[in-house]
Image (spheres, rainbow, N blue to C red):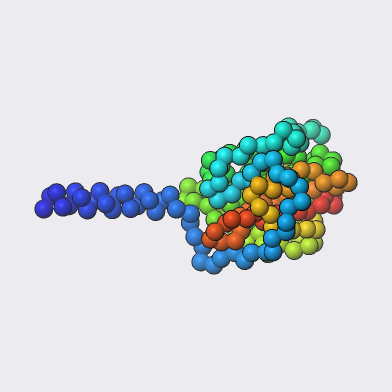
Amino acid sequence: MFRSLKVSVLVISLAALGLAALPVLPQTQTASTELNPAEVKSAGTLLGENSPELQAPAQATRTTGGGGASGTVTLTVPKLGLKNVAVTSGSSQAELDREGIMHLQGTGVPWQPGSNTFIVGHALGFMWTRVPYAFYELDKMEPGDEIITRDSNGREYVFRVYDRMTVRPADYWVTYPEDGRTIISLQTCTPAPSFKNRLVVRGELVS
């Protein structure tokens, strides 16, 4: 009897650990957009839901800050219900899984003219993720929606959405700057539950 009880407790414990490692699923699912074919050869892999470690290509822009502000970014996206969310920089899947939202290290910062500030966020996340569902409704972003960032000094940078695209995980070119614009890119995985592609929403600096 005691042996059966011990086996039952062990099985329940293992099952609980297994469930803890699974993504936390909300009650609805994200719709997918149409896939646009990539026109530029990729040189890295975009982070996603449980994707391999990121290896940034050598030609990616490297930015550590400037204009009197540090690399710390705070993000507000009214359409997504995000307000003054601290966004740390990183480049690994483990960091993204822990934080739920992350500024891709090596990409631009809002206060750098001509940059592409690339922010990655999980659509779902895990039980231990700091900001779960960060970009769960990213597919609902439309042209004209605001994306607001602040630097560590409190200076505000307002972007307006002008484009969105669905690309493959290998289409690392979406992290590169866009000629003649200072932009921000928000990226998540799509569609649920396969998450085989990446949805990218872009905004241009307006003030």
User: In the picture shown, does residue 139 fall above or below 184?
Assistant: below
Relative side of 45 to 176, left or right: left
Task: Specify the quadrant of the image occupied by residue 135.
Answer: bottom right
Q: Position of residue 108 (x, y in %)?
A: 75, 40
At 80% from the left and 58% from the top, the residue drawn is 162
Percent position of residue 104, x then y: 67, 41
Residue shown at 41% from the left, 51% from the top:
20
x and y, in percent, of residue 22 in the image: 45, 53
Quadrant in which residue 152 is drawn: top right
Work out whether residue 78 or residue 174 is closer to the camera in this orientation and state it.
Answer: 174
Q: Residue at x 59, y 49 (%)?
A: 48
Residue 152 appears in view:
no
Instruction: Tell which residue pokes out farthest to the left in this image.
Output: 1
Where residue 51 appears, x then y in whole percent?
55, 46
Which residue sits at x=36%, y=49%? 17
> Does residue 111 show up?
yes
